[in-house]
Image (spheres, grey):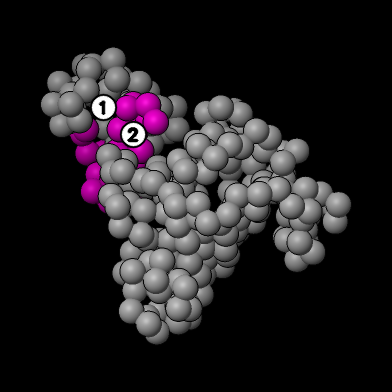
Amino acid sequence: MQKYIIISNDIRNKISKGEYVANQQLPFEKDLCIEYGSSKMTIKKAVDILVAEGLIIKRRGSGTFIKDLSPEEIERVVMGNQIRGTTALNPGKKVTSKILNFSIVKVPEQTAKKLNVSPDTFVYDVYRVRYIDGNPVVIEKMYMPIELIPGIKEKNIKGSIYEYIENILHLNIQSAHRTVSTRKATDFEAKELGLEKGDPVAIAEQVGYLDTGASFEYSVSVHRYDKFSVDIIMTRT
């Protein structure tokens, strides 16, 4: 992943978590260069991404500031953050994958309904364990239509599939419908995630959508209970 993308992800995460608040000034470019060990050009690219997303604004002669976001815009940032994937949510950390299965299959009946595709559609069947700095955090089972997301290779499964979709295929991931529940880990899940037998896990079932409205992913992820959180925006009308 390009360094400027890592930096923009980190700043975006800080905005989402409230570490940067409305109207707060970002550190000057020279200070960001020191903080991230990067050139001015790299910092400029990172900042320009966030300006284009409407998260920060540049005031001539004053500096760069966090935009005073409306509740709807804050919700957009938080929800957008949640569907960026493990790699984007952990900038600066080493994210790797252990592949349990990677194959092409005819779409399972229930998955076809979730993806709203015909029963004769072929999909990638991806099953992997994701690690952050060498520690297992989530087991992912996902299906993606090969006609919609062509050319996925093993190297993409070991890395970031979302990065491949957006940076190589130039498709825009827009939204996801997610249901979260909890249960006890199976023996297999406990072993793969480094948990004790009977420990709880969080289950996230998700259908992801491109900006065209097409569903590109159906996944079920099993998360360590101590490494998973969900941000919820509640507004009163």
Q: Secondary structure at mark 1?
A: strand
Q: Nearer the N terminus, badge 2 or badge 1?
A: 2
What is the quadrant of residue 214 in the picture?
Answer: top right
Amino acid of disc 2 = Ile
Give coordinates of residue 97: x percent, y percent: 43, 49
- Rendered location of residue 99, percent (x, y): 50, 52
What residue is disc 2 on?
6
Where the N terminus falls, by quadrant?
top left
Circle 1 Cα neighbour tier, 10 Å, few/some/many (<14 / 14–19 / ≥20): many
From the viewer's perspective, is 236 left or right of 112?
A: left
Q: Residue at x 33, y 79 (%)?
A: 196
Q: Residue 171 occupies which quadrant of the picture? A: top right
**Can the viewer see residue 21 in this picture?**
no
Residue underneath mark 1: 64
Asked if the residues shown at circle 2 and circle 1 are in contact, with their CB atoms under 8 angstroms apart, the answer is no
Mark 1: amino acid: Thr
Left or right, 123 with reference to 13: right
What are the residue bounds of the magenta stretch? 1-26
